[in-house]
Image (spheres, rainbow, N blue to C red):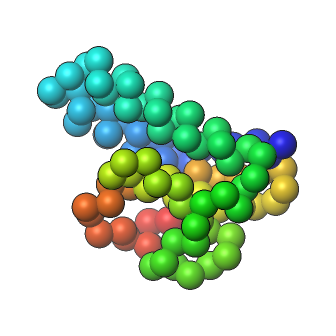
Amino acid sequence: MARLKWTDLSIEDMINIGEFISKDSIKYSVIQIKRLRERAKLLKTPPFLGRIVSEINDESIRELILGNYRIIYRIISEDRIDILAVHHSAKLLQIELL
């Protein structure tokens, strides 16, 4: 089972998502963050579950989709997966930040 490592950028993304949603509803902010974290946990067993990020086209950089959000991750090894970013699909992905 792989260990998930959340990068500083992905943690910052989650904080920003939570703060943005909480402007309308703290309850739904908490729910959305929990949903994103639960979705990411799926990667612990089959890390190749997600699809390749089309903008990067690298077999080791993949994404899981949850609603309008892309959980972008890199497979480091069988034992480690780095969550690189949690990105809203309506925004342009800035590859250089990953």
Q: Is residue 35 left or right of residue 21?
A: right
Q: Is residue 49 left or right of residue 14?
A: right
Q: From this viewpoint, is residue 55 visible?
A: yes
Position in image of residue 57 (x %, y %): 56, 81
Q: Residue at x 47, y 28 (%)?
A: 34
Position in image of residue 45 (x %, y %): 78, 46
Position in image of residue 75 (x %, y %): 71, 61
Q: Nearer the viewer, residue 85 or 44?
A: 44
Q: Which quarter shows the N terminus?
A: top right
On the image, which quarter does residue 48 sit in?
bottom right
Q: Is residue 56 left or right of residue 67?
A: right
Position in image of residue 23 (x %, y %): 16, 28
Image height of 32 relative to 3, above or below: above
| Residue farthest to the left, as pictured | 24
Q: Residue at x 38, y 32 (%)?
A: 32
Q: Residue at x 67, y 76 (%)?
A: 59
- How many tags in the picture? 0
Image height of 58 relative to 63, above or below: below
Q: Residue at x 62, y 79 (%)?
A: 58
Q: From this viewpoint, is residue 84 visible?
A: no
Q: Is residue 50 left or right of residue 81?
A: left
Q: Nearer the viewer, residue 60 or 52?
A: 52
